[in-house]
Image (spheres, rainbow, N blue to C red):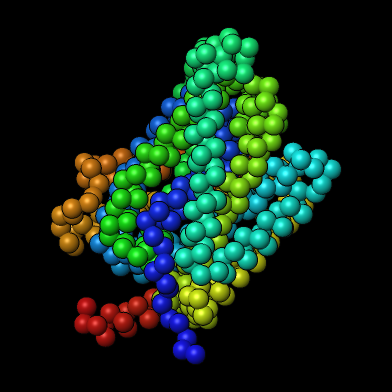
Amino acid sequence: MKQQTELNRGLEERHITLMSLGAAIGVGLFLGSATAIKLAGPGILLAYLLGGVIIYIIMRALGELAVREPVAGSFAEYARKYVSPLAGFLTGWNYWLLWIFTCMAEITAVGIYMQEWFPQSERWAWALGALILMTSINFVAVKFYGEFEFWFALIKIVAIVAMIVLGILTIVVGFGNGGTPVGISNLWAEGGFLPNGFGGVLLAMQMVMFAFLGIEVIGVTAGEAKNPKKTIKKAVNNVFWRILIFYVGALFVILSIYPWNEVGKDGSPFVLLFDQLGIPAAAGIINFVVLTAALSSCNSGIFSTARMMFNLAENSEAPRRFARLSRNGVPALATVLSGAALLVGVVLNYFLPESVFAIVTSIATFGAVWTWAMILIAQMRARKVYGTAEFGVPFFPVANYIALFALAGVIVLMAFSESTRIALIVGPLWYAVLIAVYYARGMHKETRTLKRASGE
């Protein structure tokens, strides 16, 4: 049988839209929001709005590139082509690592959620089970993977919408509160809307930006979309607004009904909300939903890391065997490598169960900032090459510079928190190792040879 050499274009518009939602609506919202609320109080709503504007600019930049050049390597390929080969190499491996750490956060969350039902169980065992399940799913043909992810993501989207509706009924007519409207006074009752000042909002931005991590998976799916130009454009325009509604709407309801200083003391704010309303059965359902949300985001993460590894291998920036595809068009060895790397997350859950979540989310956010910055820079460089674009960044290039400044601010803010400071050590060390490997393997010489051969 002939060896398949190209990824299958089996993803439809509905798959890509729900996959991007599934990747971005995960542990950052359901569990990480508790950490952010402790820092910012009700002002977390402002933090998500600010973060949303930054992400919108980044997504439009990515959309412009992906519509013009829909490739599996996405932003790594754009960085390689429009910035430098080294930038592409760093971006590809950086994205692989950040999703490894993000998936570690997701399987950690699975362990936390399962302990709600089985308090005496070991968190690491649930994390291992989730890892095996999600890695196995990624071996199926991409069309079936997309279908699986579509329904996985749909569960949590429907649940969030239902929660927002029920929450509004509680606020307005007292549903679940004996007919007494709760109102929205909790938004300012406990120390005001900004109980820790605007500084608290800024300190929460790291977790806020982590929550948005995953929305850029739209670019990675371009290589397997049936009609990439139409699909990517529509997905970029629609997904951002939906996510913003889900995040701000859901947290507005939670913070209106539940005092901010009581949120997240034990588990997910979404589970605690229904306990507060006296609906324990609904709390169990929400626990199931947030569990599927973590699995869904991890699923998208393994998909993304495997495709990025495939692209790196195609460009001889990873061992060529990782560019091999299975009979159904899946980069099998790349998927196995990503799953194996996630075993580190299981080990961390065994030895550091209380601190692993903060560690892996901060490192993932550091990597996300690099990825997003490279998207913005590559789009600016690409615009110089092909001029105007029918689908681009509003207020270009001023918006790009504003977003880049904001991303730099997120990195600076990490230095002010002990729990996120580790990312400022691990991140630069990872780039130093990658740069050393790049020059030690002579990749810079190969690039110059290729340029001479092509007459550039």
- Residue 40 can be seen in this image: no
Q: Quadrant of the C terminus?
A: bottom left
Left/right placement of residue 220 relative to residue 181 reads left
Q: Is residue 221 above or below residue 202?
A: below
Residue 312 percent coordinates (x, y): 45, 72
Q: How many marks?
A: 0
Q: Is residue 322 above or below residue 116?
A: below
Which residue does the image show at 36% across and 69% down from the upper left?
Answer: 85
Q: Residue furthest top?
A: 180
Which residue does the image show at 71% across and 47% down from the upper left?
Answer: 111
Residue 386 percent coordinates (x, y): 17, 61
Which residue does the image show at 25% across and 58% down from the upper left?
Answer: 381
Residue 233 percent coordinates (x, y): 29, 53
Q: Residue furthest right?
A: 120
Left/right placement of residue 308 relative to residue 273 reads left
Q: Is residue 286 above or below residue 349?
A: above
The answer to which of 276 and 194 lies nearer the viewer is 276
Q: Is residue 199 above or below residue 210?
A: above
Q: Residue furthest left?
A: 387
Q: Residue furthest bottom?
A: 1
Left/right placement of residue 176 relative to residue 354 reads left
- Residue 390 can be seen in this image: yes
Residue 142 percent coordinates (x, y): 48, 67
Which residue does the image show at 39% across and 33% down from the upper left?
Answer: 50
The answer to which of 103 and 254 lies nearer the viewer is 254
